[in-house]
Image (cartoon, grey):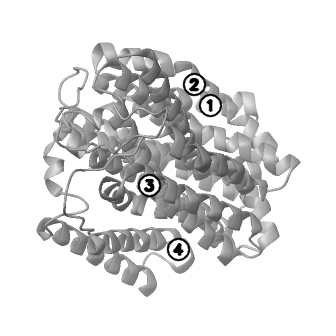
Amino acid sequence: MSASPTVHRWRAFALLALAYFMTIIDLTIVNVSLPTIGHDLHFTNTSLQWVATAYGLAFGGLLLFGGRAADLLGRRRTLMAGLAVFTAASLACGLATNDAFLIAARAVQGIGAAFMLPAALSIVMNMFDEGAERNKALGIWGGLGAGGATVGLIAGGLLTRYAGWEYIFYLNVPIGAVALALAPRIVPESRRATTRRRFDLAGAITGTGGLVLLVDAISQAPQYGWGATRTITIVVAAIALLVAFLVIESRVQEPILPLSIFRRRTLAGANVAGMLLVGSFYAFLFVGTLYMQEVLHYSALQTGLAWLVASLTSIALAGPSQLMVTRVGPKIVMVIGLSLIGAGVIWATRTPVHGHFLADLAGPMAVAGAGTAFSFIPISIAALSGVEERQAGLASGLLNTSQQLGGALGIAIASSVAASHTKLLLHTGASGPVALTSGFQHAFWVLGAIALIALPAIFVLIRGNTTPRMASTSTNTAPQAAPAGASAS
């Protein structure tokens, strides 16, 4: 292959990686700004976490639908449509003047991201042939997923301190505008060769609706009570919608999620591990940020810089992680990564009321950060193991769906556990800092357990330790004419 097309592919990859990085950063960039946002826009304590959850849930709930649209309508076209929605919603978030408007704009932002991300990853899989270059691209992609969350916290702290919380959203506007201008020139267009373009709208509605209701029930249970009529009713409705989703997917001609794909045990195991990984680590970022701000009274900037420990550790170990996957396969590396995250989060349960960064926080952050380097990358590779190229978009969309929904549910569960225990202690006469710290400690125990629960799934579902290779077929895509300077290979 000539040098020029290679350069063009990596140039396009850089733009796609930037779009991906934006969606990951926005999962956590609001975390350190939540107290400031809550004060300025008069949020209640129970609704504040929806600033984070609304984005993650809309993002995860529509990823499979976005992947389907990309396959049928054109991947670059879908990428640009999602990017335009994401950029406009970011501007709306920055202009928000009340809590309901901000939550709605964050949900729209998540919808845009849901169409951007699967389209971007499908293009990456289309540009690079199976082998060393594709593995390198996937390694970088996984590294961005591992580091993006903590980078979001740092950026959120800096912007909130020196510019105002609105600028955590305004930041996306110029980046999105530049990406929209460049995409037609350097990103190749492609789509599946098919004369049938049917969308599984019923599946998208029932699946997303069921997950939204489930997270709402979990997050609002501390306020209304776990046995309250409202909580039980919403849980039942969520289960009914999710069951309907499974029935629809088993019968519709072109399902948004063909259930047969779960017969691939390595893929199923990687998705389970991905959901639990993000459910544990992203929620750890959320709860740890609240602990630093509400108990230790860190500023947004101090909180963001504190998380730099996890980010730098993850970045430093991304290279060794990729080498280990190449040599021993994803299974062992994945086990190491999830074990480190579980250990780091459980270590954080020892954080006291009057904690200190070096003595109580730096260690857990460094260990959990190391775990992300040894888990995101092998999970990204294992989730595509043995998948025919015609299903690459589906497999990548499924992995991202699992991860984003894991993050949304993890935050909801952690918030519920922390709030319930804090409320209980306050009723017994405990001081505010003591009650808050104990609530956060209980949440850390749960989040550490979530990471460790992934280990049995990895051992049972993921076979062997050979480096996965994607099955290849030449019938899945019909690359259209690439723009000048781009390669569609």
Label 1 close to label 2 by CB (< 8 Å) = yes
Q: Amino acid at mark 3?
A: Arg
Residue 403 at least partly seen: no
Residue 315's tag is 2
Asked which secondary structure carries label 4, the reply is helix
Assess disc 2: are there few (<14), some (14-19) or many (≥20) residues with their C-alpha within 10 Å of its C-alpha: some
Could you tell whether 236 is left or right of 216 in the image?
left
Which mark lies nearer to you, 3 or 4? 3
Q: Amino acid at mark 4?
A: Gln
Q: Which image quadrant is residue 405 in? A: bottom left
* Left or right of 363 on screen, residue 72: left
Q: Would you place residue 444 above or below residue 199 in this image?
A: above
Residue 317 visible: yes
Q: Residues within 10 Å of mark 3 (few under 14, many from 20)?
A: many
Which quadrant holds the N terminus?
A: top left
User: 449 or 400: nearer the eye?
Assistant: 400
Instruction: Name the residue that disc number 4 marks.
Output: 220
Q: Earlier in the sequence, mark 3 or mark 1?
A: 3
Q: Mark 1 to mark 4: distance in Å?
A: 31 Å
Q: Which residue is mark 3?
A: 77
User: For the residue marked with disc 1, what is the amino acid?
Assistant: Ser
Q: CA distance from mark 3 to mark 1?
A: 33 Å
